């Protein structure tokens, strides 16, 4: 049963407003979507485009996990770790703030707060505790 299921397009849509569970699950276009607002868990999980995305707001963990484009995006805000992990474009992005574990484009314990708004696949752009110092060598 669908109540107020609106503006959901594409094949195999699983974006519904069923018995009030997904009130904000709207304006999502693509196939095989798994973006829901189940029991109020994903209130900001909207305006996401691209196939096979795994962009959710589960139990309020990913409040800024929206406006993410590209296939196979794994851009989340888990337990408040990635507050700036949004507005990321490109396939297979691994831009997270993972509590200091394997930081590849992360905001790890406050060291890389400006590491967002990246374009391309697997960018390795960081702002790690200050600017990168460029060095040159001279050959005599």
Image: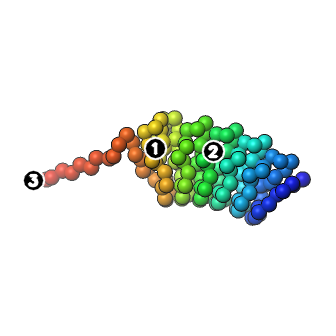
Q: Residue at x 67, y 40 (%)?
A: 60
Residue 19 seen: yes
* Residue at image point 77% right, 55% down: 15
For mark 3, give the secondary structure.
loop
Furthest-right residue in this view: 1
State the residue position of label 1.
113
Q: Is residue 41 above or below residue 29?
A: above
Q: Is 98 on the left-hand or right-hand side of 28?
A: left
The residue shown at (66%, 58%) is 47
The quarter of the picture where residue 6 lies is: bottom right
**Image marks 3 and 2: residues in contact by CB distance under 8 Å:** no
**Quarter of the image holding residue 7?**
bottom right
Residue tagged 3: 140
The residue that label 2 is drawn on is 63
Q: Nearer the viewer, residue 103 or 77?
A: 77
Q: Residues within 10 Å of mark 2 (few under 14, many from 20)?
A: many
- In 3D space, how far apart are the residues under numbered discs 3 and 1 (Cα atoms)? 41 Å
Q: Nearer the viewer, mark 3 or mark 1?
A: 1
Report crowding for label 3: few under 14, some 14 to 19, many 20 or more residues within 10 A (C-alpha): few
The reply to whether dot 3 and dot 1 touch (C-beta < 8 Å) is no
């Amino acid at each position: 049963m669908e109540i107020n299921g609106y503006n959901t397009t594409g094949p195999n849509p699983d974006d519904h407003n069923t018995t009030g569970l997904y009130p904000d699950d709207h304006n999502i276009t693509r196939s095989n979507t798994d973006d829901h607002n189940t029991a109020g868990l994903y209130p900001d999980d909207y305006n996401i485009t691209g196939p096979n995305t795994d962009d959710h707001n589960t139990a309020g963990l990913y409040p800024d996990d929206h406006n993410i484009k590209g296939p196979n995006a794994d851009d989340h805000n888990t337990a408040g770790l990635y507050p700036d992990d949004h507005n990321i474009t490109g396939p297979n992005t691994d831009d997270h703030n993972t509590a200091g574990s394997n930081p590849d484009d992360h905001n790890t314990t406050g060291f890389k707060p400006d590491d967002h708004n990246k374009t391309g696949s697997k960018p390795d752009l960081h702002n790690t505790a200050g600017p990168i110092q460029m060095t040159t060598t001279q050959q005599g």
